[in-house]
Amino acid sequence: MTHSYFIRKTLGIKDKNIHFAEQVTEERINDQNHLVLYGKLTYTPKACEKCGTVNRSSADIVKSGTKLSTLKLTPINWVTVIAVLSI
């Protein structure tokens, strides 16, 4: 059982495209403790959102860059859990 699987199972996340890193930190944000999980969302899109090009092979759509998304998840032991995903 991997670290990522355990986190997904504990939080009830069913998306298998989310992979969590082993890095888990506790940070103080706005005078409250938060548990911060870091992960990556990996998937192959079916088509380009902007131009509509259909992705038939790995050469059709080339991903150039990532962005960070911060998600507030279900609290564990009254500590807010935040997931920082690289998309």
Image (tube, rainbow, N blue to C red):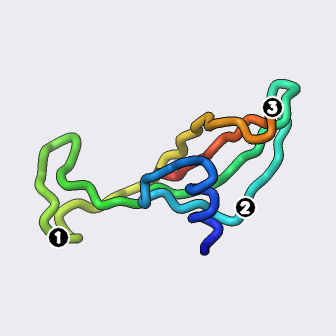
Q: Label 1 crowding class (10 Å Cα cut-off): few <14, some 14-19, many 20+?
A: few
Determine whether label 3 and label 1 are within 8 Å by CB: no
Q: Secondary structure at mark 3?
A: strand
- Mark 2 or 1: in front is 2
Above or below, 21 relative to 13: below
The residue labelled by disc 1 is 57
Q: Secondary structure at mark 1?
A: loop
Q: Cα distance, mark 3 to mark 1?
A: 43 Å
| Residue type (three-letter) at the residue carrying disc 3 | Ile
Q: Position of residue 39 (x, y in %)?
A: 58, 56
Q: Position of residue 65 (x, y in %)?
A: 43, 54
Q: Label 2 crowding class (10 Å Cα cut-off): few <14, some 14-19, many 20+?
A: few
The residue labelled by disc 2 is 23
Q: Cα distance, mark 3 to mark 2?
A: 18 Å
- Name the residue: 69% across, 65% down: 22
Above or below, 20 relative to 78: below
**First in sequence: mark 2 vs mark 1:** 2
Quadrant holding the N terminus? bottom right
Residue 63 occupies quadrant: bottom left
- Name the residue: 53% across, 41% down: 69
**First in sequence: mark 3 vs mark 1:** 3
Left or right of 76 on screen, residue 72: left
Q: Secondary structure at mark 2?
A: strand
**First in sequence: mark 3 vs mark 2:** 2
| Residue type (three-letter) at the residue carrying disc 2 | Gln
The residue labelled by disc 3 is 29
Which of the two residues, 46 or 1, is positioned nearer the viewer here?
1
| Residue type (three-letter) at the residue carrying disc 1 | Ser
- Name the residue: 84% across, 35% down: 33
- Name the residue: 20% across, 49% down: 48
Left or right of 51 on screen, residue 24: right
